[in-house]
Image (tube, rainbow, N blue to C red):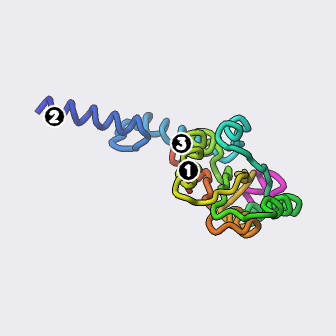
């Protein structure tokens, strides 16, 4: 019985170490965990995509911005993060004058640029390689959107004429984890 109890405590500690909020009976520890989640969320909401991450992960990036005037505008007026600024929209539309791509890769900070910073280097090169090996024509330029929401990726897809957009976007602050979605 002691062995099973000790094993259960080790498994619980391992899960808690991975961010799972299970079996937190100590009030001070529970409050500290909530504070840590809050701090992580606040940092995520105001983080920026690191230029070194973009240089390392992409073969060629086009950096664009949405209509959001600032990060605060992006957070308080969500529609401003759904469309590109006019000059950036024109730049995206002129990317492929000869042959439009089947697949356009888009990266946005979304609500959690820390997720992009933590995961893009490991993820993006493999996505590009796998799509190319499967015979898909992937756009030569990766579009990186500052203050971009999901619909900003749709805007890019429409302007490039791509059949498919793979939009990697930071999301869900407030979990204590930095999650990136496609």
Q: Nearer the viewer, residue 60 or 1?
A: 60
Q: Which residue range is magenta in the image? A: 67-76
Circle 3 crowding by C-alpha within 10 Å: few under 14, some 14–19, many from 20: some
The first of marks 3 and 2 along the sequence is 2
Give 145 or 8, whichever is nearer the viewer. Answer: 145
Q: Which mark is residue 127?
A: 1
Q: CA distance from mark 1 to mark 3?
A: 30 Å
Q: Residues within 10 Å of mark 2 (few under 14, many from 20)?
A: few
Q: Quadrant of the C terminus?
A: bottom right
Q: Position of residue 157 (x, y in %)?
A: 70, 66
* Dominant SS in magenta: helix
Q: Residue at x 30, y 37 (%)?
A: 12
Q: CA distance from mark 3 to mark 2?
A: 31 Å
Which is more foreground, mark 1 or mark 3? Answer: 1
Q: Considering the numbered disc 3 on the image, is that residue within a helix, a strand or a loop?
A: helix
User: Which numbered marker is on residue 4?
Assistant: 2
Nearest to the observer: residue 112 or residue 154: 154
Q: Earlier in the sequence, mark 1 or mark 3?
A: 3
Residue under numbered circle 3: 37
Q: Is residue 90 left or right of residue 166?
A: right
């Amino acid at each position: 019985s002691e062995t099973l109890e000790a094993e259960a405590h080790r498994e619980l500690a391992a899960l808690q170490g991975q961010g799972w909020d299970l079996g937190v009976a100590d009030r001070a520890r529970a409050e500290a965990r909530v504070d840590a989640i809050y701090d992580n969320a606040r940092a995520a909401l105001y983080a920026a995509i690191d230029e070194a991450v973009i240089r390392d992960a992409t073969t060629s990036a086009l950096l664009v911005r949405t209509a959001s005037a600032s990060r605060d505008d992006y957070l308080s007026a969500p529609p401003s993060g759904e469309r590109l600024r006019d000059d950036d929209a024109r730049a995206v539309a002129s990317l492929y004058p000869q042959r439009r791509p089947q697949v356009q890769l888009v990266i946005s900070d979304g609500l959690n640029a820390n997720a992009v910073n933590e995961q893009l280097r490991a993820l993006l090169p493999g996505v590009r390689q796998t799509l190319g090996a499967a015979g898909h024509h992937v756009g030569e330029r990766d579009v990186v959107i500052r203050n971009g929401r999901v619909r900003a990726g749709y805007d890019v897809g429409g302007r490039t004429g791509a059949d498919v957009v793979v939009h990697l976007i930071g999301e869900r602050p407030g979990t204590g984890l930095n999650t990136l979605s496609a």
